[in-house]
Image (tube, rainbow, N blue to C red):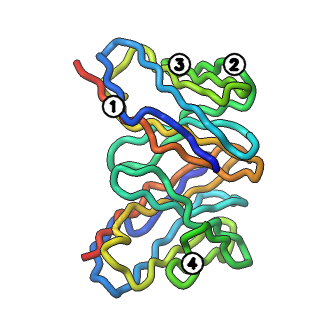
């Protein structure tokens, strides 16, 4: 299985500011995803991070709000832009390893005041 | 539309057995996953079923019936540390993972 780390693990931010979350994997993976999980809710896929091209966003999520970078097969960043309290959530990086199983990073807990 | 249905919450007793059901309606099927998520932590992979039948892994087993669009996760010899949310997810024909809302399992001594 892949080992995934995320930075920061948590942050408290002021509305209107932006936060960039980093995801590092210990091996090269083809598929990387960014999810959001709000308190008591299930996982919501934000986008698929594509290496060398623009991310593929799910309905309700746009690049201007959640720009994503994927410069190589082991690293990706998600930026939460112009934050509002509604963006308070856990943001999770996820990868597919072994072509089948999806593994999750430890998550970034974001609180926007 | 696509949806995954699971009970919201279940309660069981330490040492007992509990079965968490999951029914799904998706555009195609390429496997069903169960994940465990403790409060404040990321989901961890438990099991994967792509063929009908029972997959056993220690105290945990997962069953799949594709014709019925149905799966269950069976937890035996329950321990207090099994208190967590259990997420059912189905990979559809586009290889997208569709997630259920999760079942919160409460274990009582």
Residue under numbered circle 2: B53
Q: CA distance from mark 4 to mark 3?
A: 42 Å
Compute the Cα span from label 3 to label 2: 16 Å
User: Could you say which disc has been placed on residue A113 in the image?
Assistant: none
The chain under label 4 reads A
**x, y percent for residue A18:** 40, 83
Figure label count: 4
- Closest to the camera, between mark 4 and mark 1, is 4
SS at mark 1 in the image: loop
Chain name for mark 2: B
Circle nearer the N terminus (3, 1): 3
Q: Give the residue at x 71% y 44%.
A: A100
User: What's the residue at 27%, 82% (across, down)?
Assistant: A14
Spot occupied by residue B48 in the image (x, y as percentages of width and height): 64, 33
Query: CA gap, disc 3 to disc 1?
Result: 17 Å
Instruction: Give the image quarter of residue B53.
Output: top right
Q: Are marks 3 and 1 in contact (CB under 8 Å)?
A: no
- Residue marked by disc 1: B83
Looking at the image, is mark 4 or mark 3 nearer the viewer?
A: 4
Query: In this rendering, is residue B35 above or below B55?
Result: below
State which chain disc 1 sits on: B
SS for tag 2? strand
Dot 1 or dot 2: first in sequence order is: 2
- Mark 4 surroundings: few (<14), some (14-19) or many (≥20) residues within 10 A: some
Q: Nearer the viewer, mark 4 or mark 2?
A: 4
For residue B58, the mark is 3
Residue occupying the point 55% across, 66% down = A46
Quarter placement of the C terminus of chain A: bottom left
Q: Are marks 3 and 2 in contact (CB under 8 Å)?
A: no
Q: Which residue in the structure is indicated by mark 4?
A: A62
Q: Are marks 4 and 1 in contact (CB under 8 Å)?
A: no
């Amino acid at each position: 299985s892949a080992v995934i780390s995320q930075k920061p693990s948590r942050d408290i931010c002021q509305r209107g500011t932006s936060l960039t979350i980093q995801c590092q994997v210990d091996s090269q993976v083809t598929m990387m995803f960014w999810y959001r999980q709000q308190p008591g809710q299930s996982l919501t896929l934000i986008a698929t991070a594509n290496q060398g091209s623009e991310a593929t966003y799910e309905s309700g999520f746009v690049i201007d709000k959640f720009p994503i970078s994927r410069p190589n097969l082991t690293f990706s960043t998600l930026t939460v832009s112009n934050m509002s309290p509604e963006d308070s959530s856990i943001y999770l990086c996820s990868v597919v390893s072994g072509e089948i199983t999806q593994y999750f990073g430890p998550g970034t807990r974001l609180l926007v005041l | 539309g696509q949806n995954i249905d699971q009970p919201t919450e279940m309660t069981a007793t330490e040492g007992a057995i509990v079965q968490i059901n999951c029914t799904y309606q998706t555009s195609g099927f390429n496997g069903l996953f169960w994940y465990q998520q403790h409060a404040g932590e990321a989901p961890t992979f438990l099991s994967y079923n792509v063929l009908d039948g029972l997959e056993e892994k220690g105290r945990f087993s997962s069953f799949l019936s594709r014709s019925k669009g149905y799966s269950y996760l069976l937890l035996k010899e329950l321990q207090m540390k099994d208190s967590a949310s259990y997420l059912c997810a189905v990979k559809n024909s586009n290889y997208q993972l569709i997630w259920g809302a999760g079942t919160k399992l409460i274990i009582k001594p």
